[in-house]
Image: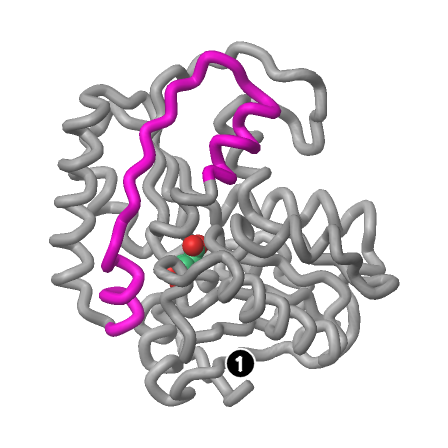
Amino acid sequence: MAVGIFDSGLGGLTVLDAAQKRLPDVDFLYYGDNSHAPYGVRDAEDIYQLTHKAVHDMWDRGCNLVILACNTASAAALRRMQEAGVPEGKRVLGVFVPLIEALTERQWGDNSPPREVAVKHVALFATPATVASRAFQRELAFRAIGVDVEAQACGGVVDAIEDGDMILAEALVKSHVDALLRKMPRPEAAILGCTHYPLMEDIFQKALGPDVQVFSQGRLVADSLAHYLERRPEMIGGGAAGYLTTGNAGRVSSRATQFLRREITFEAA
Ligand code: DGL
């Protein structure tokens, strides 16, 4: 019995960790496509094909529900996969909506027309592919009016995290925050629109200053998953729990263990 959590690499662990804490009785199958990370510099077709393959693999292993714990895959592949039709009894969901509902002060699943919200200036940090897709702005426009979004494509940050080079990742985060603040000097809120970035959340917060509210996805997605499973318990699915990677299992395990500060053992997908 396992819910699938998918990411291009290690970033989805930030969502997995929050989901495990929120739902201690639910098992999860984590799948990191580390050998193809980063997705954020690939084109939309490529991201779709990779995501499609991994999600079908997870469904075949018994998951009924797969969460794309990857904004880049959610932006480039989710709608296309849903429109192409998913097999009976299977679902794939993304990570944008819970974040945008929190930002726009909406209850889970509130589909009422867009309205004015308290936050007017929002900084979005995401991968180049997510920024280029404008998927975040589209989802926001369905729910809020009058919000100014300044997006910063954070090239290099995911590669540095995947390589375990946290000094480089920190330097890149600071320079991307500087670049954003030159375009929008006083954001009220900042969205960490890539699941790798919560691993650097302290650095983002420090560079942005204490007055900026930083939104990251882990807890928000975990809460929304809990609501969903309450209504649809059959989506917990079958199949074994565990950690799969298309990359080097030993290396990925040691990075994951370092990030989550507990022993994590990946196997080859
Ligand atoms: N964690 C993915 C996301 O949320 C990273 C994408 C990448 O591999 O570049 O966008």
| As drawn, 24 above or below 130 | below
The x, y position of residue 37, in whole percent, is 39, 70
Range of residues picked out in magenta: 134-163
Residue at 27% over, 49% down: 154
Quadrant that contains the C terminus: bottom right
Tell me the element at label 1: strand
Quadrant that contains the N terminus: bottom right
Name the residue beneath numbered marker 1. Answer: 244
Closer-to-camera residue (190/224)? 190
Place residue 89 in its image quadrant.
bottom right
Place residue 177 in its image quadrant.
top left
Residue 146 colored in magenta in the image = yes
Residue at 22% over, 28% down: 210
Horizontal side of 104 relative to 59 (left or right) equals: left
How many numbered marks are there?
1
Residue at 64% over, 43% down: 224
Residue 113 colored in magenta in the image = no
Q: How is the image coloured?
A: one colour
Horizontal side of 137 relative to 258 (left or right) equals: right
The x, y position of residue 140, in whole percent, is 53, 28
Closer-to-camera residue (233/134)? 134
